[in-house]
Image (cartoon, rainbow, N blue to C red):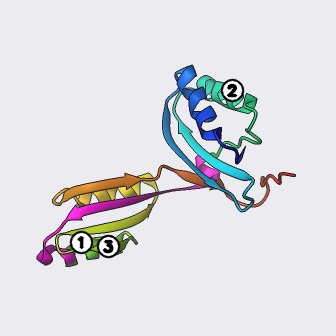
């Protein structure tokens, strides 16, 4: 959780860059209180590197709270938008697969469709594997966002 100040994303990403840490996924958004922004950062490394990242982030002025999200007690999701080239005769097959994955067709033109899908990475990857017979024109992925389960560890700022 960070203060919603100009440049805060630059400070956080700059720390990773300066220290040579890799960011696997990075998403941010203003919280219910517009003074604060929640960042979800996925980084890889051994436990020592991850602890060092946490300590370095805690030193940044705009960082208010850091919470690790263990896989077994958190909910993670990612959003993809994928634009594929389709013929009239292929549309229904794409719609059927999209519905199986609980996705939505959000745009259709005479030669393309845009599909929206949210879920865990393995679900999104499985969906993308089923689209290999179609030309993917564009793909956008949000990166992971997540929250811990339950109300026990909610942090109230103020």
Residue 125 can be seen in this image: no
**Pointer 1: what residue?**
94
Residue 37 can be seen in this image: yes
Q: Is residue 138 above or below residue 19?
A: below
Residue 122 highlighted magenta (yes or no): no
**Pointer 2: what residue?**
56
Q: Badge 2, how many Cα within 10 Å: few under 14, some, many 20+? A: some
Residues shaded magenta: 71-91
Q: Earlier in the sequence, mark 1 or mark 2?
A: 2
Q: Secondary structure at mark 1?
A: helix
Which disc, if any, is residue 19? none
Q: Residue at x 12, y 77 (%)?
A: 89
User: What is the x, y in percent for residue 108?
Assistant: 27, 74
Residue 87 highlighted magenta (yes or no): yes
Q: Residue at x 23, y 62 (%)?
A: 84
**Pointer 3: what residue?**
107
Q: Badge 3, how many Cα within 10 Å: few under 14, some, many 20+? A: few
């Amino acid at each position: 959780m960070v203060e919603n100040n100009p440049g805060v994303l630059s400070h956080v990403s700059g720390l990773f860059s300066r220290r040579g840490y890799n960011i696997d996924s990075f998403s941010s958004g203003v919280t219910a209180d517009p003074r604060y922004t929640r960042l979800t950062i996925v980084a890889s490394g051994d436990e020592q590197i991850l602890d060092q990242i946490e300590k370095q982030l805690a030193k940044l002025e705009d960082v208010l709270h850091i919470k690790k999200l263990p896989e077994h007690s958190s909910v993670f999701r990612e959003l993809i938008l994928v634009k594929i080239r389709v013929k009239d005769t292929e549309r229904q097959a794409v719609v059927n697969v999209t519905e199986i994955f609980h996705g939505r067709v959000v745009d259709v033109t005479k030669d393309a469709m845009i599909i929206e899908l949210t879920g865990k990475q393995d679900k999104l990857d499985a969906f993308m594997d089923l689209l290999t017979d179609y030309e993917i024109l564009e793909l956008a992925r949000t990166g992971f966002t997540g929250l811990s389960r339950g109300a026990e560890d909610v942090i109230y700022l103020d």
